[in-house]
Image: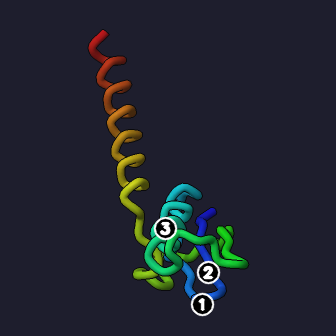
Amino acid sequence: MPFTYNCPPCGTASRPYTFRAGAEGHAVRHRHRRHDGDYPVGECIQHIAWVNPRARAGVWRPSRGDAVAAVVAGLLVLWSVWHAFTN
């Protein structure tokens, strides 16, 4: 389930992140840029419902960490299949 960072004092919400770490990283960057590193009252990381990608194609895109995790997982699968057939 995707995560978003919400900052009520600014009235902003981040884009959806697959992993909580992505939303937390967004929160850290936001705090440093907009609040000089302070924690705004009421800020939170929330679960959001999955969005149908066919309904709105531009709603979700993977973060850099999501892309790296997908590449690493794909390489591990390819390596395990190659290893199984060569040994």
Q: Between residue 67 and residue 28, name the one nearer to us.
A: 28
Helix, strand or loop under label 3: helix
Q: Residue at x 27, y 14 (%)?
A: 86
Circle 1 is placed at which residue position?
11
Asked whether 3 or 54 is in front, the reply is: 3
Tell me if mark 2 has few (under 14), some (14-19) or many (20+) residues whose alpha carbon lies within 10 angstroms of its own.
some
Q: Amino acid at mark 1?
A: Gly
Q: Which mark is residue 7?
A: 2
Mark 1 vs 3, N-terminal side: 1
Q: Amino acid at mark 2?
A: Cys
Q: Amino acid at mark 3?
A: His
Q: Are marks 2 and 1 in contact (CB under 8 Å)?
A: yes
**Residue at point 68% right, 71% down?**
44
Residue 34 image offset from top left, x and y in percent: 48, 80
For image coordinates 67% across by 75% down, the residue present is 43
| Mark toward the start of the polypeptide (3 vs 2) | 2
Quarter of the view holding residue 23: bottom right
Quadrant assignment, res 9: bottom right
Q: Is residue 55 above or below residue 28?
A: below
CA–CA distance in space, label 3 to label 2: 11 Å
Quick one: 39 or 52, which is closer to the camera?
A: 39
Give the CA separation, mark 1 to mark 3.
15 Å
Query: Which percent across, then down, holds residue 47?
Result: 68, 68
Residue 25 rendering spot, x and y as whole percentages: 49, 61
From this view, report whether residue 2 is shown above or below residue 10.
above
Distance between the Cα atoms at labels 2 and 1? 6 Å
Name the residue tied to disc 3: 26
Residue at the outermost top position: 87
